[in-house]
Structure formats: structure tokens, C-alpha cells
Image (spheres, rainbow, N blue to C red):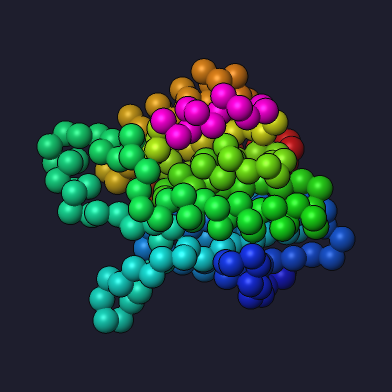
Amino acid sequence: MNTCTFQRIADLDNLVRQTPQNRRCIVLLHGFGANFQDLTGLSTVLDPTQSWDWYFPNGPQEISFSDEYAGRAWFPIDMQRLQLALMQGVRQPFRNEIPAGFTAASLSVDRLVRELGSRYDQIVVGGFSQGSMITCDVALHTEQKLSALLLLSSNVIAKSRWETAIKRKEKAFKVFQAHGQFDNVLPVDGAKELADFWTENDYSHEYVSFPGGHEIPYPVLDNLKKFLASL
């Protein structure tokens, strides 16, 4: 099995798993506080025959949790405000906002995707949690043709920006979405709103609900593996 190598593409650091002659790839974005190593193991689970190349970019923001550990993020999150909002029953406190750094991160991933467009015939972009929100924004604004989106534990953010963008977007990609019924980080209400966003705009959309939290369990991976095989 191939191991990942380091590549700097556009302005992002990436861990990459490549196989000679592959003409399709998957770009997978980690969540808040993780880094580009976090999701690399999914490539062996979802693609044991190595029929895709895999790119795992590192978020541009460094997030310090302690003296011993600093993770990465795509854009900063006011964690105190988020926790307070959830305690007060506000289920989606950022749904109508464009956070600082959000657009810049989206543009960075877009540059990566467009550069990969010169190497591959088929591109899938996905992410977990915060990474999936950037995935949505990239898909709605990039000029690069995409085959599919993989949205794992996602929610609506920058709603007006997305509603404006989707009116101009050609319906060229499929959407896979999965969310835990008991997710206490990104509540399921926001996932359902995101699912409605795609279906109301007539996108091909598959939604997998599971009895869990903010995670990617094996039943989701089984469904995702089938989804990728269908592309």
C-alpha cells in the first residue's frame, strides 16, 4: 500500500497518496483542530484498490491547544460563543455569517483544486466538520468541474453567500452527506437544513443518518465506499 508523501501545491501543504496512471483524485479536508494527517487512513479503507489519488491539505490557521499540541483550522472559531449559544438552545449560531478567514481558506482550496484540474479527469472534494463547510463553499464558487462532494458532519454557514452562488452554478456534481443523530458539536438541525439546500436546488444527494455523534463510523464508510464506486 502506498504511503503519503508531502507536496506543496498552490499555497497549501498536502499529504498525498498517488498511484501511477491514475486520472482521478479525492481532496479531503480535516476538521477544526486536527491536521492533514487526521484523515489519511480513510484512503486505505475507502480505496483499497488505489483507483484514486488522495490529497489531504493542511488548514492555513494554527490553533494552539496547549504547550504540547497545536492543531490546524480552516478559519478561527469563537469556541466560547459557540458553547454559550448551544447552552442557550441556539442551534446554528454561525449559519448567517461569513467568519474571518473563511473566504481566504476557500480560495486557497480552490487554487489547489484548479491546479489538480490539469492533472486529473475526475475530482472529488470532501471534508469533515469545518473542512466540509469549506468544501461546500469551494464547490459553489470554483470554475473547476467536480464530480462529487463528500460532506461528513457538516452544517450550513455563510447561508446568503451560498444561496447567491448556487443560483449561478451548473448542477454538475453529486453530493454525499452523513451526520450523527446525537452530534453535540454541529447539531443535526443544521445538517438537515444543508440537505434541504441541495435537494431544493435539484442536486443528486445521498444523506446517511447514523445513531452517533461528531464522528465518521464504519457504517458511514461502507456507504461512502459504495458512493465512490458508483462515480
Residue 167 in the image, given as x and y percentages of width and height: 57, 24
Q: Nearer the viewer, residue 219 or 224?
A: 224
Q: What's the residue at 73%, 57% (across, down)? A: 116
Residue 18 figure quarter: bottom right
Q: Is residue 119 visible?
A: yes
Q: Is residue 183 visible?
A: no
- In the image, which residues are magenta? 160-171
Tell me: residue 179, above or below residue 131.
above
Tell me: residue 175, above or below residue 28.
above
Q: What's the residue at 72%, 70% (across, down)? A: 2
From the viewer's perspective, is 37 left or right of 68? Answer: right
Residue 62 figure quarter: bottom left
Q: Nearer the viewer, residue 163 or 3?
A: 163
| Image quadrant where one finds the N terminus | bottom right
From the viewer's perspective, is 79 left or right of 141? Answer: left
Q: What's the residue at 33%, 76% (across, down)? A: 69
From the viewer's perspective, is 79 left or right of 52? Answer: left
Q: Is residue 169 magenta?
A: yes
From the viewer's perspective, is 63 left or right of 176? Answer: left
Q: What's the residue at 52%, 51% (across, down)? A: 106
Residue 71 in the image, given as x and y percentages of width and height: 38, 69
| Image quadrant where one finds the C terminus | top right
Residue 47 in the image, given as x and y percentages of width and height: 69, 54
Which residue occupies the extreme bottom position in the image?
67
